[in-house]
Structure formats: structure tokens, C-alpha cells
Image (cartoon, grey):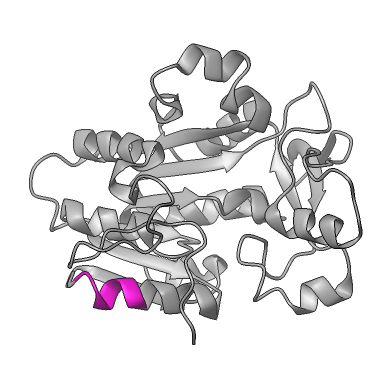
Amino acid sequence: MPVEFIQHNIRLANGSETRPGSGPTMDRHPWFLAAKRILDAIFPGDKSQYRIADLGCLEGGYATEFARMGFRSFGLDVRETNIAACEFVKANTGLANLEFVRDDAWNVGKYGPFDAIFCCGLFYHLDRPKQYLKLLSESTRRLLILQTHFSTSESSTTSYLPSIVRKLLARRGAKSTTAKYILSPMTVHDTLRGRWYTEFWNDQVFKDREKHREASWDNLKSFWVQREDLIQAIRDVGFDSVMEQFDGLGTDIRDSMLSGYYHQHSRGTFLGLKATA
């Protein structure tokens, strides 16, 4: 299986990078640094006794950095191409506390329980969000870090088109491929308000889904939960404390929320924390 990195620039043991020249390595990524701050606060000191899962881990960048923090780190992804990249990283970092498994994210319960779950870039590709939140609660003892797009009541377009669709539009001669995601009108699904998004435009694209590494797997549509409903749902499935974390937006949080990334992409980080026994 050929190894190709499309997202994660990971520093390897010999000092090389998986995507040289593409920007900061994963250990400097704002989303990782935000997760690190929370993890250090909840699990101070020696972390070797704690397990953390990175679900939909793509090329393994976050899972690798969690292992470097000292956690027993477990990355799960359904695509063979992604796992091939993950195994390359494991072989070239020498981290004995780093493990990758190819499986559907719905099967996370087989590998738990975990002390913490990190779910970044996966949740908004699912079509049964409330059920998946219940599964995440059942699979973690303490902490959920959920980094995801969400719906708002303001508009049915919330973010840029994914790379798959941009390429398809370009091949079809579209003059502009910078339009926003097209979401359905607000509706209720799985007891939650939100909007539907079409993951695959036709049967052929779905058949070739192994190639589309940033799309869903076995569902043709995904459901983007409205922000307020998402916060409530995290509480309802068993997390005693629910928070939204904003420091992953960088130093200019206010502008990001008013007109920048957070406002334009409707994407944030949500935390669920279970009280200790």
C-alpha cells in the first residue's frame, strides 16, 4: 500500500517530516496544543497509565503526539490508505505506546474503555450523531474532546466545499470552486436539530470511497447537529460537565468568532468531562 500524506505533517524520529514545507508539524498545530492543555489539566504528571483513542485518526498525527505526551495512544481509522500512513509513522517514530487499528469507528467499543477520546474531523461525517455520542460516553471513563463542524440557525451554507467536491466541480468546468457547503433546511433527526449534508454525489464516487480520505464511509449523507443541541446532547449521554473550548482558534479568538474561521466554518471544540467517582 503506497503511503501518501495529505493532511498531517508529522515529525519523525530522524527529524524529517511527512509533509515538508506544508507548515508547522502536528506538535505545533493549534488544535493539538488546545487538546494538550486540557489533557495536561485532567491527567497531570505521568500519563503512562492512561489510554487515549484518536477516532478517525487519518494519518495518525494527533495519536502520535498523544503518545509523545506519554499516553497509551490508540488510533482508529477505516481506510486502508490512512492506516498505511499510520503504520509508516509508527515504524519511523519508535513509539512503543502507539497503536493503530483499521476498523469502523462505530466499533470503538471493542477496544475500550479509554480514559479519554479525541474525535476530530469524524463526527460531522456520521448520520446517527446521538447514537454515536452515546457510544463515546460508554467508551470513555473521563474525557471527550470533540472537534467538529456544527449547524447554525442562521444559514444553510456554513463552510467551504471539501476537496472531493472541488475537484469534481473543476473537472466539470466550474468557474469557481470556493462556494460553501450546501446543507439542507433545518430539520430534526436522531432527536437533534440540524442539517443534512450529502457526502457522495453519485454511486461511482461512493464506490471509490477508499480514495476519498476525508469523507464518510458507509453513509451517503451526514447530519450536522445544531450547536446548542450538540452541547445538550453531550450532557444527556452522561458527561457531567460540558464546555466549549476556544483557545484552539489561536490568539485572536474574538475575531475568529465574529468574522474569521469559527464564524465562516462553524467548527469548534466541545468537551465532555465525567466527574471522578
The quarter holding residue 231 reads top right
Q: Position of residue 177 (x, y in %)?
A: 80, 46
Residue at point 67%, 27% (across, down): 264
Going by the image, does 129 lie left or right of 35?
A: right
- Foreground: 94 or 111? 94
* Residue lying at the far left of the rendered structure: 46
Whether residue 151 is visible: yes
Going by the image, does 132 lie left or right of 18?
A: right
Q: Quadrant of the C terminus?
A: top left
- Foreground: 91 or 197? 91
Residue 19 belongs to magenta span: no
* Residue lying at the far bottom of the rendered structure: 1
The quarter holding residue 38 reads top left
Residue at point 50%, 61% (across, down): 56
Going by the image, does 177 lie left or right of 113?
A: right
The quarter holding residue 84 reads bottom left
Q: Which residues are magenta?
A: 88-93
Residue at point 46%, 78% (across, down): 3
Q: Position of residue 109 (x, y in %)?
A: 45, 67
Q: Main secondary structure of the magenta part?
A: helix
Q: Is residue 234 above or below residue 51?
A: above
Q: Is residue 182 above or below residue 252?
A: below
Q: Position of residue 96 (x, y in %)?
A: 17, 73
Q: Position of residue 170 (x, y in %)?
A: 83, 56
